[in-house]
Image (spheres, helix red, strand yellow):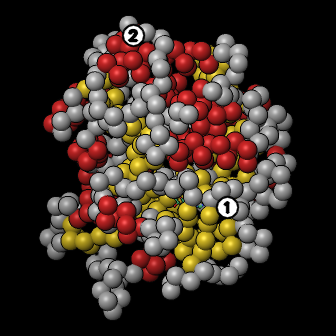
Amino acid sequence: MNANLYAIFAARFPADRSACCIETHDGHYYSWSDMERASAKIANLLASLGLAPGARVAVQVEKSPEALILYLATIRAGLVYLPLNTAYRQAEIDYFLGDAEPAVMVCSPANFGWVAQSAFKSGTKHVFTLGEFANGRNSGSLLERAAHQPDQFETVARSGDDLAAILYTSGTTGRSKGAMLSHRNLSSNAEVLHRYWQWQQDDVLLHALPLFHVHGLFVASHGALYSGSKMIFLPRFDAPQVTQLLARSTVFMGVPTYYVRLLADQRFGAEACRNMRLFISGSAPLLTETFTEFQGRTGMTILERYGMSETVMLTSNPVDGERRGGTVGPALPGVSVRIVDAGRNPCAAGEIGDIEVKGQNVFQGYWRMPEKTAEEFTADGYFKTGDVGRFDQDGYLSIVGRSKDLIISGGYNVYPKEIESEIDDIEGVAESAVIGVPHADFGEAVNAVVVLRADARLTENDVIQALKARIANFKVPKRVHFVTELPRNTMGKVQKNVLRERFG
Ligand code: MLC
Ligand code: AMP
C-alpha cells in the first residue's frame, strides 16, 4: 500500500467530490474535486522540474486555500514540505535556505525580489510566487505556471519512513533545528486524533490558525482532510469574525490567546456556540481562569491537548469523559509518555519530572544534526521533550514548566538565546538577558534586560527598532529594561528568576 500521506487522505475524501472542502471568509468554495485537480496540476509542475526524491520545497506565503493545495501537491509529488512563518525577515530566511538547501522556494509576490536573491545565493534553482500582488504584475506565479499542467497526477509511492515535512524549531543553544517528520509520523497522528476527537464527515472546522505550524497544518487541516469534513478558512484569527462564523461550525481550534480574545468580547456566549461540538486549545498553557470563564459563558468545556513540532500530538483530554482544566489529558492511544526524575528514574503519580515520549508520532531526527538528535533521545528510544510535568492518579498530565529556556508568546515559540545574541550585536550593548513575563493577551511577553557600554546612549525604542529590522515581529521584546549589571549566581549564570520577579 502507498503510505504517502496524500494517498491516505484521498482514500477518505467524500464519495461526492462535488461537496465543499473549503469555504473562504469571502464566499469562495473549493470542492474536494477542486482540491484533487488543483493539487495534481501543481504536483505535475513540481514533477516537471526533475527534482531528486526528498528534495525540499520551502514555502513562505500568506494563508489561502491555494497554500494548502501547494502543501498537498508537494506531498503528492513525493517531495518534502518546509513551511516558514510569514513574519520571518531576510536574515532568518537566509539561514533556513542555507541550512535546508531547498530545490524550490515559494514566496509572496511582494517579497519576490529579496527572496529570489537569497534563494539563488544559496543554490535554490526554482523560485515561484503564490498570492496576490498589489500592482498586478506577478513574476514567477506558481498558479500561472501550473495552469497548463494536466489535472490528473498519480500520487508518488512513499514508504512510511520517507520524509514528508521539515519544521524548523528554534534551538536553546545556537540556531534553529529542522525537525524531520515522516509520512507515518503524520498519518498515524491524524488517524489517532480522528478517532479520539470523534471527527465526523459532517463536522465543519472553523480554521483560523496559520498554516505554517503544527497546530494549523497538521492538527487542524489534517483533522478535516482525514475526516472528509468541510473547513471554513479565515486568513487570520479575528474575534468578531470567529464569533459570527461559529454558528455554522462544529469544531474550532486555537491557541489560548484566541480564547482570551473571544471572551473579551461581551457578545460572545452560548448563542454563538449553539452549533458547536468541540473547542480545542493547545500550543501554550491555557489558564484555569480562561477554562472556567469559557465554561461559565458558553456552557462548553474547552478540550486541552499537548504537542510539539518534533512529536505532533502527545496527550489530549477526552471528548467523552472528564476534561480537566489545568491538565493536557492522558497520553493518546499508541503514544507512550513517561515522567522521569533527575536520575532518570520513573516518577510516581503526583511527582514532578521531565516529560519523555515514544511512538509512531515521534520525528526522525533533526535535519543534518545527528549529534543533536542523539542527545535528545534516551538509550531506550524516548524523546526528551524539554517540558516538565506530573501525572495525576488517573493518568492526566499537567505541564508545570520547561527545562528548556523558552518563551511561548501567543502560541509562538521564542528562544531567549537567539534574541540575546541579536541584542548583543547592537552597537553600544554590553550584554543582555531575555525573559518571559506574564501577559494578559499573549500569555507570556518577551522582555529584554540590557546592560549598556559605558559611553552608549541607546533608548528602549532604539533597541526595538534595531531588532525589528532583523527578526520576526513576534520575537521582538515588548519592553526593554536597562540595568547596570545582570544578577548572577556563584557559577556566573544569569539569574533569570530574579529578573522575572523584578520586571514581571
Ligand atoms: C503578533 N504579534 C505578536 C504575536 N503575534 N507578538 C507576540 N506574540 C505573538 N504571538 C505582534 C504583531 O506583529 C504586532 O507587532 C503586535 O504583536 C500586535 O499584533 P496583533 O494585531 O495583536 O497580533 P495578531 O495579528 O492579532 O496576532 C496574534 C495572534 C497570532 C495570537 C492571533 O500570534 C497567532 O495566530 N498565533 C498563533 C500561533 C500558532 O499557530 N502557534 C502554533 C504553534 S504549533 P507590532 O510591532 O507591529 O505592533 C505548536 C505545537 C502545538 O506550538 O502543540 O500546537
Ligand atoms: P513547538 O516547538 O512550536 O512545536 O512548541 C512545542 C511546545 O509548546 C511544547 O514543548 C510545550 O512547551 C508547548 N505546548 C504545546 N501545547 C501545550 C499545552 N497545551 N500546554 C502547555 N504547553 C504546551
Q: In this rendering, does residue 475 appear at all?
A: no
Quadrant of the drawing holding the N terminus: top right
Left or right: 417 in relation to 325: left
- The image shows residue 168, relative to residue 273, as above or below, that is below
Left or right: 63 in relation to 46: right
Image point 69% across, 42% down: which residue? 194
- The image shows residue 306, relative to residue 298, as above or below, that is below
Q: In this rendering, does residue 178 appear at all?
A: yes
What residue does disc 1 label? Answer: 331
Name which residue type carries label 2. Answer: Gln
What residue does disc 2 label? Answer: 149
- How far from the left and from the top, in percent, is residue 3? 53, 37
Name which residue type carries label 1. Answer: Ala
Looking at the picture, tell me which residue is in the foreground, 335 or 398.
Answer: 335
Q: Secondary structure at mark 1?
A: loop
Image point 82% across, 59% down: which residue? 322
- How far from the left and from the top, in percent, is residue 153? 46, 17
Determine crowd level at label 2: few under 14, some 14-19, many 20+ residues with C-alpha closer than 10 A.
some
Looking at the picture, tell me which residue is in the foreground, 293 or 139.
Answer: 139
- Picture quadrant where residue 278 is located: top right
Looking at the picture, tell me which residue is in the foreground, 434 or 113.
Answer: 113
Q: CA distance from mark 1 to mark 2?
A: 44 Å
- How far from the left and from the top, in percent, is residue 489? 36, 88
Could you tell which of marks 1 and 2 lies nearer the N-terminus?
Answer: 2
Residue at the extreme top: 148
- How far from the left and from the top, in percent, is residue 227? 69, 33
Q: Secondary structure at mark 2?
A: loop
Left or right: 130 in relation to 264: left
- The image shows residue 358, relative to residue 257, as above or below, that is below
Image point 44% across, 27% down: which residue? 156
